Image (tube, grey):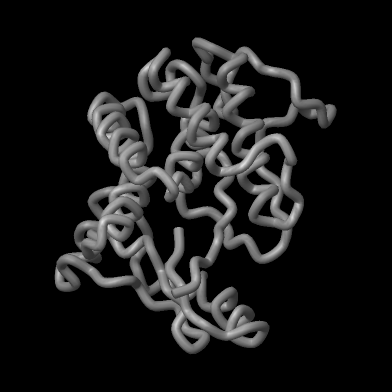
Amino acid sequence: MRIVTRVVCAGLAAAALLVAGTGCGGEDDDGTDEPEAAGDDGAAVGDPELRQELLDMQEADQGDRTGAPVEEWDDDARTSRLAEIIDEHGWPTRSLVGDDGATAAWLIAQHSDLDVEFQERALELLRQAVDDGEADPTELAYLEDRVALNRGRPQTYGTQIACVDGRAEPAELADPDRVEELREEVGLQPLEDYLAELEPACQEEAGAAGGDEPTG
């Protein structure tokens, strides 16, 4: 099945599909990338340099997925660096790196498919951060589903979507009858709306090459 790669802008776990280049936050108004003492929501950040590093890693991640890779980075290198950050700081929380920095950390973990054991470690830390009000529960839902599929299990929230004959369909669900209730509990939009947003990308991919694969 074909993964529909998505761009994730700061604070939006369910951001726009990556069909064309889409800019994310992290720049000052003058277009520079200097570290800021506050996150994108204006709140104080405990470690602005770490926040900026995570935003740079996010930019490299998205560059890899838009055909504009940053040569010194790849998914493996970003996974290794995030593991080092976690060893030193624990999970990068909102208080430490701002909402956008925390989202960047989540995105790197979400794309660490080559090291599922690390993804599982990140999942446990992210779960605790959500419990503490220091991370986004929608991001947790995406990582829960990603790890489940990587371990050959059905997903809970329906965030991982396959393109099947040009249509967006959720990968196997653990509890299809409750998926809408579970999505609502963590702040995700209705599954029907989510699939509708992904449909154009699936149609485009079907027209370009065909084949199937899941997303997130």
Above or below, 65 relative to 154: above
Q: Quadrant of the C terminus?
A: bottom left
Q: Residue 48, how many percent across, how many down?
A: 59, 14
Residue found 57% across the figure and 28% down from its top: 54
Residue found 46% across the figure and 20% down from its top: 85
Q: Is residue 57 left or right of residue 82?
A: right
Q: Quadrant of the N terminus?
A: bottom left
Above or below, 22 relative to 160: above
Q: Residue 56, how many percent across, how many down?
A: 66, 31
Q: Is residue 113 left or right of residue 137?
A: right
- Is 150 or 125 nearer to us in this picture? 150
- Is 115 or 210 nearer to us in this picture? 115
- Is 170 or 61 nearer to us in this picture? 61
Q: Residue 11, how many percent across, how many down?
A: 50, 39
Q: How many numbered markers are drawn?
A: 0
Residue found 73% across the figure and 41% down from its top: 70
Residue at the outermost right position: 30
Q: Quadrant of residue 215?
A: bottom left
Q: Is residue 88 left or right of residue 153?
A: right
Residue found 22% across the figure and 62% down from its top: 153
Q: Residue 156, how many percent across, how many down?
A: 23, 59
